[in-house]
Amino acid sequence: MIETPPLVYVVDDEPSVCVSLKRLFHSIGLETRTYTSAQEFLGSERPDAPGCLVLDVRLPGLSGLDLQQELAAAKTALPVIFITGHGDIPLSVRAMKAGAVEFLTKPFREQELLEAVQRGIYAGTRSTSPP
């Protein structure tokens, strides 16, 4: 059986952030797909592979928190890690209560994000594995 490598989805409206994160994840062997809006992500085809979603809170149109709620309502088992330049405690509490793996404020340490992504991938693998 061929195992599909983990896939990290990045949704951020800043193209430079998408490029930087794609390079960072590629450096540890993770495949990455980037999107500049929640709508673009929702319209994409996603393979049945373990992975996680690195998601900006503030996005044009549908916000990151709204996207998280839509995915939860659709019972999409995709762990979410929020990154934002505009974080505050109530916002982070709201995201974590809704099931986010981590909530990081820009600028964040790369190692901190990589650890969160590894936790997210592991959590996603566990939630989709048979009992």
Image (cartoon, helix red, strand yellow):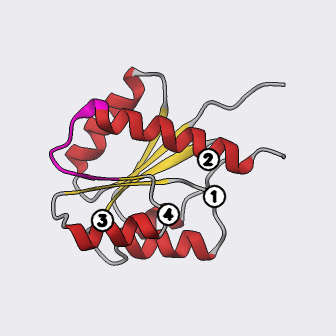
Judge whether 9 appears above or below 84 on screen. above
Q: CA distance from mark 3 to mark 1?
A: 20 Å
**In this rendering, which labeled residue sits more in front, label 4 or label 1?**
4
**In this rendering, which labeled residue sits more in front, label 4 or label 2?**
4
- Mark 3 belongs to which amino acid? Ser
State whether residue 16 appears in this view. yes
Q: In screen coordinates, is 3 left or right of 109?
A: right
Q: Residues within 10 Å of mark 2 (few under 14, many from 20)?
A: many
Q: In screen coordinates, is 56 left or right of 54?
A: left
Q: CA distance from mark 4 to mark 2?
A: 12 Å
Q: Which residue is mark 4?
A: 99
- Asked which secondary structure carries label 4, the reply is loop
Q: In screen coordinates, is 131 left or right of 31?
A: right
Q: Looking at the image, which residue is at 53% across and 53% down?
A: 79
Number of the label disc, if any, that sits on residue 77:
1
Q: Earlier in the sequence, mark 4 or mark 2?
A: 4
Segment tinted magenta in the rendering = 103-111
- Give the number of callouts: 4
Residue 73 location (% of width, % of height): 61, 77
Q: CA distance from mark 2 to mark 3?
A: 21 Å
Q: Which residue is mark 3?
A: 92
- Asked which secondary structure carries label 1, the reply is loop
State whether residue 59 appears in this view. no
Number of the label disc, if any, that sits on residue 124:
2
Residue 22 location (% of width, % of height): 36, 36
- Asked which secondary structure carries label 3, the reply is helix
Q: Quick check: is 110 in the magenta stretch? A: yes
- Asked which secondary structure carries label 2, the reply is helix
- Mark 4 belongs to which amino acid? Gly
Q: Earlier in the sequence, mark 4 or mark 1?
A: 1
Q: CB under 8 Å between callouts 2 and 1?
A: yes
